[in-house]
Amino acid sequence: LGDTWWSLLLAPPLAVLWARTAFVAHDAGHAQISGDRRTSRLIGLVHANLLLGMNEAWWNDKHVRHHANPNHVDKDPDVGVGALVWTQKQAAGREGFARWLARNQARLFFPMLLLEGIALKVYGFQFLRHQSARERAVSAVLMTAHLALYTTLLLTTLSPGRAVVFALLLHAVFGLHLGMAFAPNHKGMEMPDPDGDRWSHLQR
């Protein structure tokens, strides 16, 4: 389409494609695509790090801990205190702006999802310091290559202003779409009491 605002119409379908790419990386992390561990890792690196700029090592670390103890406030990173809170006890410990955010998080949930696409990239780069030197190098090179290629593509087809708007729109729709995929599968699910009876493997 060239350097025109009409190019923004391409952002939503690209966001859907990005979400499908994330799903492939997710399944590779679960070893659901190939029985070979190295092949699964390669699929994950290509789809997450290179195509999305998201660190598959960060995702797998977090996701494996989530599946090992789903909704356990002390062990599942997905229900730890962050931008959102998941229990009354977590909410009670907040102060200032964080307290206001906790009180209004239900109505702010979807607007906050608009930032998730960018947050996934940030978390990935932050996780590099937790990886071994070799793993860090591979992840960093692929994620940096993603940013370089993506920026080059935008700036060689669009003016800087339109390129920034396109990138923001793409990441916003991408985050919203991912949130609308994962949230219905997790909201309203039982949360075990950390001080209560231990859940069996089948319950978890």
Image (cartoon, grey):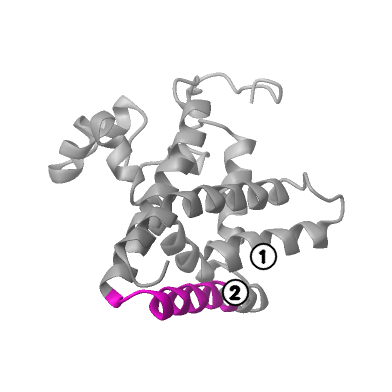
Quadrant assignment for the N terminus: bottom left
Under tag 2, what secondary structure? helix
**Picture layout, residue 19 above or below residue 106:** below
Give the numbered dot on residue 170: none
Q: Position of residue 13 (x, y in %)?
A: 49, 50
**Picture layout, residue 38 above or below residue 181:** below
Look at 54% across and 67% down and name the residue there: 130
Look at 31% across and 29% down and name the residue there: 89
Asked where in the image residue 139 lies, by quadrant, the reply is: bottom right
Q: Position of residue 57 (x, y in %)?
A: 61, 60
Q: Residue furthest front?
A: 1
- Local crowd at mark 2 within 10 Å, few (<14), some, or many (≥20)? many
Instruction: Please provide the residue range marked out in magenta.
Output: 141-160
Q: Which residue is mark 2?
A: 142
Q: Is residue 143 magenta?
A: yes
Please state which amino acid type lies under the numbered disc 1: Val
Cβ–Cβ below 8 Å for labels 1 and 2? yes
Q: Which residue is mark 1?
A: 46
Q: Is residue 199 visible?
A: yes
Under tag 1, what secondary structure? helix
Look at 51% across and 71% down and name the residue there: 129
Between 67 and 50, the residue placed more toward the observer is 50
Please state which amino acid type lies under the numbered disc 2: Leu
Question: Left or right: 12 with respect to 140?
Answer: left
